[in-house]
Image: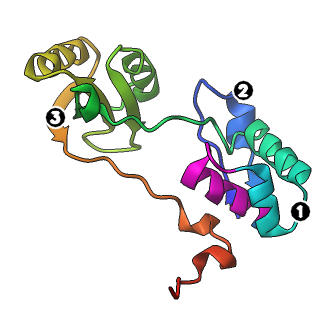
């Protein structure tokens, strides 16, 4: 399988954006296990599944990090337990330097994610957090100062993630018979 890392300011420019990285069954197992639980998965756990040494797993993880396939490790925060709500702003940039606008918007204190879409209205999605309706209005006001139009605002009821099944090895894709 070939993966192309996204192009943004956190990478070493166009060179990284234009490279692809080949991954094999060992890399797929590493990616799958790290995605499911990076904090509690050891190199030994992964090594046992794919019959390699823990040193090989560490070397593979280092290579995946250097090549930009693995960009980082982040906690999953439950904002409700902090008394905050997540808010999705669907914005349109009119295609004028969307990446520059996204980078600037992502620096706002309560913005936790931006997603750039390649075309159409709503080409920039911004997820932020707020302590209530006043916080939502404040974040909306801050976004209005950028070169974009807010098309829609929605409170996020739940936010889930699942790993890419393409990274599962044959061992992981067999159904449980318990």
* Residue 15 placement: quadrant: top right
Name the secondary structure under disc 2: loop
Badge 1: residue crowd in 10 Å (few <14, some 14–19, many ≥20): some
Q: Is residue 150 above or below residue 107?
A: below
Q: Earlier in the sequence, mark 2 or mark 3?
A: 2
Task: Decide: few, some or many residues near mark 3? Use Cα within 10 Å; few <14, some 14-19, many ≥20.
Answer: few
Q: Residue at x 76, y 68 (%)?
A: 49
Q: CA distance from mark 1 to mark 2?
A: 31 Å
- x%, y% of residue 156? 21, 41
Residue 47, can we see it?
yes
Instruction: Check disc 2: other Cα within 10 Å, few if <14, some if 14-19, many if 20+.
Output: few
**Can you name the residue that lies furthest to the left here?**
133
Using the numbered discs, state the Cα–Cα distance from disc 3 to disc 1 in whole angstroms.
51 Å
Horizontal side, residue 41 vs residue 155: left or right: right
In front here: 95 or 155? 155
Question: Could you tell me residue 147's position as x and y percent?
Answer: 29, 17
Q: Which residue is mark 2?
A: 12
Q: Which residue is mark 1?
A: 52
Front in this rendered view, residue 92 or 175? 175
Q: CA distance from mark 2 to mark 3?
A: 33 Å
Q: Is residue 168 left or right of residue 93?
A: right
Question: Is 126 above or below relative to 163?
Answer: above
Q: Which residue is mark 3?
A: 151
- Would residue 94 be seen by someone viewing this image from the given angle? no
| Magenta part of the chain | 26-41
């Amino acid at each position: 399988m070939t993966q192309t890392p996204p192009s943004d300011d956190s990478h070493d420019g166009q060179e990284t954006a234009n490279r692809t990285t080949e991954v094999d069954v060992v890399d797929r197992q590493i990616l799958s296990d790290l995605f499911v639980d990076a904090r509690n998965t050891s190199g030994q756990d992964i090594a046992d599944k794919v019959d390699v040494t823990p040193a090989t797993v560490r070397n593979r993880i280092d290579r995946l990090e250097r090549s930009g396939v693995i960009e980082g490790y982040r906690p999953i925060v439950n904002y409700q337990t902090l008394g905050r709500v997540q808010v999705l702003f669907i914005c349109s940039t009119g295609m004028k330097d969307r990446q520059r606008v996204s980078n600037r918007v992502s620096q706002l204190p309560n913005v936790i994610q931006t997603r750039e879409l390649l075309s159409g209205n709503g080409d920039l999605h911004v997820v932020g957090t707020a302590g209530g309706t006043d916080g939502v209005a404040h974040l909306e006001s801050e976004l209005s100062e950028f070169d974009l139009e807010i098309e829609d605002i929605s409170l996020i009821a739940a936010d889930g993630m699942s790993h890419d099944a393409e990274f599962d090895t044959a061992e992981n894709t067999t159904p449980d018979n318990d």
